[in-house]
Image: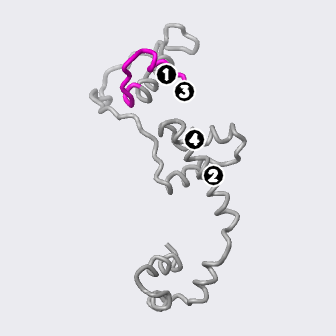
Amino acid sequence: MSPNELVELGTDILPIARVCKLLDVPRSSFYERRSRRPSRRTLVNAILRVHIRAEFKRYHRRYGSPRITRVLRKRNVQVSRKHVARLMGADGLVARRKKRFPVTTPSNHDHQIAPNMSRRGNCLDNAMAESFFATLEFELLRQHLFVTRSQALNAGSD
C-alpha cells in the first residue's frame, strides 16, 4: 500500500494535515495524487476485471485463469494467462478444485511394472471418457442437488 493510500485511510480518523505529517507525506503530493486521473493501465485492468468476474460467475466459479483466458481470447480480448491470474488473485477469485486423493500404493518397489496396453485410437481405452465423467461429476453433481432428471440434463447443457 502506498503512503498516499495510507493517508487516505487515515483521514477518517484525523485531519489530512495531521495524517500527512505523521506519515511524512507532503500534503501537496497527496492532493495532486488525489486529483490525478486514473492511468490507462488502471482503466484497462478495471475493464478486464469486469470481464473476468462475469465469466467466473457465468461458469459457476469452476474456471481458473487458464480457462478464463481461453474464453476471453475467444471473445477477442487480448490478455495473457498471467495477467488474468494476477487480477483474479487480487479480486480473490479462486476456482473450485478437485479433491486430491491420498496415494495408498507405494510406487518405490522392485517389482516389474506391467506394460501399458492403452494406445492412441484404441476403442477399448476409456481414459478420455473417464476424464470427462470425472470432470462432469466434480463440476455438476457434487455442487448441486437435482430433484428431477430434467434439471440435471439442463444443468449439463450450460
Front label number (2 vs 1)? 2
Amino acid type, callout 4: Glu
Label 2 or label 4, whichever comes before in sequence order: 2
Relative depth, front residue between 143 and 79 = 143
Disc 4 target residue: 55
Residue 86 or 39: which is nearer the viewer? Answer: 39
Q: CA distance from mark 3 to mark 2?
A: 23 Å
Q: Residues within 10 Å of mark 1 (few under 14, many from 20)?
A: few
Quarter location, residue 142: top left
Quick check: 105 above or below 58? Answer: above
Q: How many marks?
A: 4
According to the picture, the residue beneath numbered tag 2 turns out to be: 48
What residue range appears in magenta?
A: 141-158
Q: Was residue 148 drawn as part of the magenta stretch in this picture?
A: yes
Q: Residues under labels 1 and 4: Cα distance?
A: 21 Å
State the residue at coordinates (69%, 39%): 75
> What is the distance, in whole Å, between disc 2 and disc 1 at their CAs?
30 Å
- Res 28 → quadrant: bottom right
Magenta-colored stretch includes residue 1 = no
Specify the amino acid type for callout 3.
Asp
Residue under label 3:
158
Where disc 3 sits, the SS reads: loop
Q: Assign a secondary structure to mark 1.
A: helix
User: Is label 3 in contact with label 1 (beta carbons under 8 Å)?
Assistant: no
On residue 132, the disc is 1
- Dot 4 falls on a residue whose secondary structure is helix
Please state which amino acid type lies under the numbered disc 1. Answer: Phe
Q: Position of residue 144 (x, y in %)?
A: 39, 28
Badge 4: how crowded within 10 Å, few (<14), some, or many (20+)?
some
Q: Residues within 10 Å of mark 2 (few under 14, many from 20)?
A: many
